[in-house]
Amino acid sequence: MVKKKGKALKKVKEIKGQLGKKKETAREKMIGQSIGYRYDVNLLPDYNKITPFLKKYIEAMGWDDLNWLEDVHMGYEEDRPAVFCRNANGWVTIPSSIKLPNNQQDRDMIARELLVKFQMSPKHPLVDLKKAYLKF
Amino acid sequence: MANLKNVTKKSKAQSMGMHTEVLTGRTQQKFFDPDEAENFYYFGTYDVDFNKRTNLDVKDMNAAEANKEIDKLMSEGYGTIVIKNPQGKHSLGVGILNKLNLIFEGSLGYFGMGSCDGPIVRINGRVGWSCAENLMAGKVVIEKNAGSCFGAAIRGGDLICKGSVGARTGIDMKGGTIIIGGDAGAFTGFMMQRGRIIILGNVGINLGDSMYDGTIFVGGEIGSYGSDAVDSELTESDQDWLRRKLKVAEIGENFDVSKMKKIVAGKKLWNYDNLEPTEKKGAI
């Protein structure tokens, strides 16, 4: 049997998360990194979008800026917008009554506000754990 | 809470004989009202006043006694506590989950200010290994130098060392910001997963070795890059953020941030994608 001449097409194996190996979003191209999480963890907050609640929170804590909330972004859980609560190790879904704006920076501020409210709520799961297991 | 006992259909793992027990307590639903009373502090923490100030001499106390005394002072409403004679004791100021203004008049030993969430701390001296390990939120400022593993595994907050730091700064960090006014040692940002490190001076070998994500900004010379650490373009947004953060850190006010190098993860070591949590959930 005569072999066909010509270059055999090599299959390029897609490596997840590696730039150049998959179709990048505009944001990924801009920052030169691929976004493997449910949101861009490196997105820096836009302080012009800060909400009055967050301003009061920063003032109450005596901080100069958003501090730990700089790392908080809005993601999704089961097709619903959500924010991750590190203390409860779970996603807090955004109530459908809250209308979400079109840009990520505004959405992130809403996520930060909601997360603070959830963590400081007496209904937070850690409150029950604290009551049950607090040693001193 | 999901009542899994009522689920009669066997899961895939169950039908394959991998386990027989009914999995309970893995899914939890908690409801709360976002419009409920405005509260800025964790449930059960102390209501302290920054203007209420006191001194605490820990010369004749061990770390456990000193930490309990700090807790007692917070319960009495003191929002500013000055610790006298820390004398390099280990594990001072750990586990503070309260808003607080804490000032150490001296140096700390190993593991100082570990696992804290919220306080503003100023240490007018040096610190040993693993200062502010697992910091969740707040601000810790060290006026002099710091030892190895500075800010190991921090998850949030601002950790500032005005002097130089040892090796493995920000090892395994998962968020927050570490700011170094001087130089940093080898393996800075080793295996970091999120967050940002700013080094105004030089940094040692293997910078950002095996980093998964996050960003490192360097103002001086880099000894060498670690595995999968790559250069990236410094954007306008980065520069604005750097200027603001250095102002917060009270260092490098006249530092030219536009000449800083930005290092990120090349992500060739990645083994997970954005579907992983959902897939994992399905597998469980």
Image (cartoon, coloured by chain):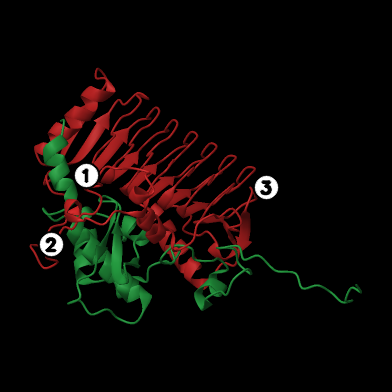
What mark, if any, has residue B224 been given in the picture?
3
Q: Colour of chain B?
A: red
Judge left or right: residue B29 versus residue B216.
Answer: left
Q: Give the class, few, some or many, for how many residues have Cα within 10 Å of label 2's Cα (few <14, many ≥20).
A: few
Whole-percent x and y of residue A102? 34, 82
Q: Colour of chain A?
A: green
User: How many callouts does the rendering have?
Assistant: 3
Judge left or right: residue B139 versus residue B195.
Answer: left
Direction bottom: furthest residue: A102
Residue B157 in view, yes or no:
no
Circle 1 SS class = loop
Q: Are marks 1 and 3 on the same chain?
A: yes
> In percent of the image, x 53 and y 59: which residue is there?
B255
Judge left or right: residue A126 versus residue B282.
Answer: left
Distance between the alpha carbons at the discs numbered 1 and 3? 39 Å
Check disc 2 and report the residue beneath it: B32
Q: Give the class, few, some or many, for how many residues have Cα within 10 Å of label 1's Cα (few <14, many ≥20).
A: many
Distance between the alpha carbons at the discs numbered 3 and 2? 50 Å
Whole-percent x and y of residue B142? 40, 40
Tag 3–tag 2 contact (CB < 8 Å): no
What mark, if any, has residue B100 been given in the picture?
1
> In percent of the image, x 61 and y 52: which residue is there?
B220
Instruction: Answer with mark 3 or mark 2, whichever residue precedes in sequence.
Output: 2
- Chain of the residue under the numbered disc 2 shown in the image: B
Q: Give the class, few, some or many, for how many residues have Cα within 10 Å of label 3's Cα (few <14, many ≥20).
A: some
- Chain of the residue under the numbered disc 1 shown in the image: B
Distance between the alpha carbons at the discs numbered 2 and 1? 28 Å
